[in-house]
Image (tube, grey):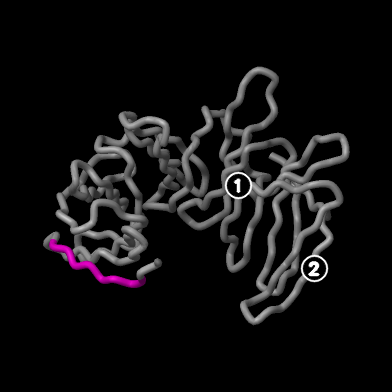
Amino acid sequence: MKNINSINPFKSRVKKTEFGVLTNLVTSIEISSKESISFEEKTFLANYIYKEDGTYNLVYTVVDTDGNVESFVEGDGILPTLFLSPDQKNYISVVPYHPDKELEISIPIFNRENTEIPKGNRPFTGNFIGTSNQFSIFYDVDIWSDKKPDKLLAIEFKNDKVKKKHNIKVPLPRNNKIFISNDEIHLLTNDNNVWIHRQIDEKGNVLKDRTIKSSKDFFWEILSLSFEQDSYILCEENGKVSIEVISINGTTENIELIDIK
């Protein structure tokens, strides 16, 4: 594959504030923000930059901590999904133009000279979560159904290249939050007024599970989740924000943070 080319579609303004460096990117017509992710110690953006005739280019922009900007144009692709490989290199899934098919390919953003154009797959609608062992992990919850199982996409790498994509239906219960740490994948959901904590592998197999009787019916986000140490879950109920602490043996303690009235 050909490497992406440099482009300069922005006028940038940099302002230093007490909160940090503020960078404004301005285009002559229109910009549509799509994705962002870390790139080394910089910020990596994927945007559509529109032209006067209504067409657009997919443009990648790197912004460093001083507000310096460098942009590149994608040769052929829309609907970008940014992610990291297991060795923390920046990759992207895009849909190249085809008159009859909408198929997604996953390729490195930079240094493509040794990459062959891969076979396309049906696009995955979930979000990039993180990496576990030799896999990049994506997760999707169908918000329009209360019956369909969650879906997991595990992109397997070998020798710094995409080897295979594994599309997996996660065993019920559904509507899980997902947390990855130390090459472990953890799920947490509310089911019949109890919390279900599971650890799965990259193929969706359940390795461990437990039922947690929490004082809270619902939760916002997972701060940390583990079978080997205390877990911390962010909750909110009637304006009261708290952290539910789950011990190794499954007992819980609620720590109130703030009451928003």
Crowd around label 1: few <14 · some 14–19 · many ≥20 (10 Å) = many
Whether residue 3 appears in this view of the structure is: no
Instruction: Please state, as top left, top right, bottom left or bottom right, where the N terminus lies in the image.
Output: top right
User: Mark 2 sits on what residue?
Assistant: 13
Q: Amino acid at mark 1?
A: Pro
Per the rendering, the mark at residue 108 is 1
Instruction: Please state, as top left, top right, bottom left or bottom right, where the C terminus lies in the image.
Output: bottom left
Position of residue 33 relative to residue 169, above or below, is below
The CA distance from mark 2 to mark 1 is: 29 Å
On the picture, is 170 further left or further right than 105?
left
Q: Amino acid at mark 2?
A: Arg
As drawn, the residue found furthest toward the front would be 261
On the picture, is 203 further left or further right than 26?
left
| SS type, badge 2 | strand
Query: Magenta span covers which residues?
Result: 251-258
Q: Is residue 74 magenta?
A: no
Q: Looking at the image, is mark 2 or mark 1 nearer the viewer?
A: 2
- Magenta-drawn stretch, dominant element (helix, strand or loop): strand
Expressed as whole percent of the image width and height from the top left, the position of residue 154 reads 41, 41
Along the line of sight, the residue nearer the viewer: 52 or 92: 52
Along the line of sight, the residue nearer the viewer: 79 or 3: 79
Q: Is residue 254 magenta?
A: yes
Position of residue 22 relative to residue 52, above or below, is below
Position of residue 70 relative to residue 120, above or below, is below
Q: How many marks?
A: 2
